[in-house]
Amino acid sequence: MGRGSAVYRRLMLSLFGNRMLGRLISRHGARLAGRFVAGRDRTSALLVVQRLNRLGIAATLDHLGESVRSLEEAAGFREEYLRLLDGIKLQKAKATVSVKPTQMGLALDPEACFRNVRQIAERAKKAGTSVCLDMEDSRYTELTLELVRRLHDEGHRNVTTVLQSYLYRSEEDASRLLEEGIPLRLVKGAYQEKKEIAYPNSEDILLQLLKLIRLHLEQGVFVAIGSHDDRVIGEVRAYAEKFGIDRSLFEFQMLYGLRMNVQAELAQSGYQVRCYVPYGRQWYPYFTRRLAEKPSNLWLVVRNLFR
């Protein structure tokens, strides 16, 4: 089963990487992407956050976009995040923001990226919230961790980041980041990576994720758990119950449009839950990664075609 899931993901990511198919889906797929994307602008996204907050679910907002082609484009994304944070403050929303480093220019100019993220972190502090630097594909893992460490060294303690359990290196990274006091969101990982650097089998990926989660819980360090997997959710709940771990030390994070009933049920049961809410016009890469994660996501979209 694990091998089949990995084959499905590789196949779908390769398929969606086809330029002709990409243009076709981009032209006609916006309505379908609405299953996973909370609108094209921050006004729509903040309305979604209001609804989630009323259900006891926090949010993290992601203005979609990655791998910008110019620093001017990166500056435009930075300004959108600054306005978004102003909206969060005005609305008194229970929400953070998630930012992709390449969206801020990491691949073009790491120094410019640092300055952009620093401005966002400063505005987030004024809004009483935090910034999570999303982890992208493995080309940017080390650069992203360096960026986070540098921001923390400057006193921007409201910056967090992500580790992907499918990378072999993540256990060592997690141990170091724990020592450095840098909060983490732990996920399985959704990019196509070579077997030389990443576990190809989904069971191994899941086991490493559980290991990294326990590493945090054992040390009493807060951890965000990005997973829709019943096994992960169940094992975390059982582990916390068995060892008397306070629920304030962990948070379940799930994606907008996926298992919304489970998110609501967990929140009603007294667990911390945060929904990852993406918005914007550059939805194609995010949307196709969601479809590639597992066949049931693709089936959700296919069913919507006939509604």
Image (cartoon, rainbow, N blue to C red):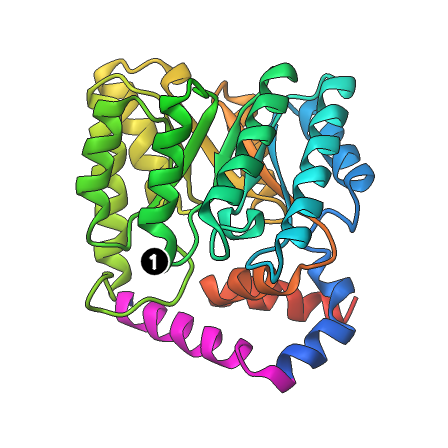
Q: Quadrant of the C terminus?
A: bottom right
Which three-letter amino acid code belongs to the residue tagged 1? Answer: Ser
Between 262 and 193, the one lying in front of the other is 193
Q: Mark 1 highlights which residue?
A: 138
Where in the figure is residue 241, as x and y percent of width and height?
Answer: 29, 20
Outermost residue to the bottom: 20
Between 219 and 147, the one lying in front of the other is 147
Q: How many marks?
A: 1
Residue at 42% x, 78% y: name it: 11
Q: Give the quadrant of residue 196.
A: bottom left
Q: Is residue 214 above or below residue 301?
A: above
Is 225 left or right of 301, judged from the image as shown?
left
Q: Is residue 120 above or below residue 68?
A: above
Residue at 35% x, 23% y: name it: 153
> What range of the chain is rendered magenta?
2-20
Residue 14 seen in render:
yes
Where in the figure is residue 154, as x and y percent of width and height?
Answer: 41, 21
Is 270 left or right of 219, judged from the image as shown?
right
Q: Is residue 263 above or below residue 246?
A: below
Residue 188 seen in render:
no
